[in-house]
Amino acid sequence: MEAEVEEKEGRSEGEEEEVRRNGKSEEKQKKQKKDKKKKEKQEQEKYEEDKRKGKFDIREIGTQNMKRFI
């Protein structure tokens, strides 16, 4: 009877460990997604600021050159 109890406890601990791992990976993914959005927002703000100051972005110059050829 004690062996059965130990087996059940062992499985539940393993399941709890799996749940903890899954929870951590979900939290990690959410954090990475949040960080990525934050980084994109910062890049966009920097681009807008440089544009106001008169600095040109390589992408913008390339599209201007393409428009000239068309």
Image (tube, rainbow, N blue to C red):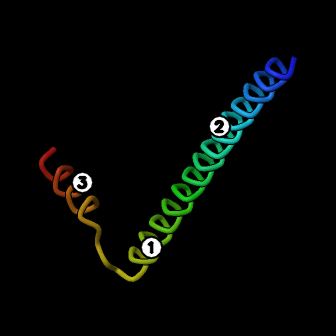
Give the mark, 2 or 3, whose residue is nearer the N terminus.
Answer: 2
- Which label lies toward us, 1 or 3? 1
Residue pointed to by mark 1: 46
Label 1 sits on what residue type?
Lys
* Closer to the eye: label 2 or 1: 2
**Type of the residue with mark 2:** Asn
Q: Nearer the viewer, residue 40 or 62?
A: 40
The residue carrying mark 2 is 22
Q: Residues within 10 Å of mark 2 (few under 14, many from 20)?
A: few
Classify 18 as above or below 32: above
Name of the residue lying farthest toward the bottom: 53
Residue at (34, 80) in percent of width and height? 54
Residue at image coords 69%, 31%: 14
Q: Residues within 10 Å of mark 1 (few under 14, many from 20)?
A: few
Disc 2/disc 3 C-alpha distance (Å): 45 Å
Question: Residue at (58%, 46%) from the top-left corner?
Answer: 29
Q: Would residue 25 be found to the left or right of residue 47 on screen? A: right
Q: Secondary structure at mark 2?
A: helix
Judging by the rendered image, the residue that carries numbered circle 3 is 63
**Secondary structure under the numbered disc 1 in the rendered image:** helix
Q: CA distance from mark 1 to mark 3?
A: 19 Å
Assign the C terminus to one quadrant of the image: top left
In the rendered structure, the answer to whether residue 20 lies left or right of residue 51 reads right
Horizontal and vertical percent position of residue 17: 69, 38
Task: Look at the image and tell me in which quarter the N terminus lies.
Answer: top right
The residues bearing labels 2 and 1 have C-alpha atoms spaced at a distance of 36 Å
Measured from the top left, where is residue 7 in percent x and y?
76, 22
Q: Mark 3 belongs to which amino acid?
A: Thr
- Which numbered disc, 2 or 1, marks the residue that appears first in the sequence? 2
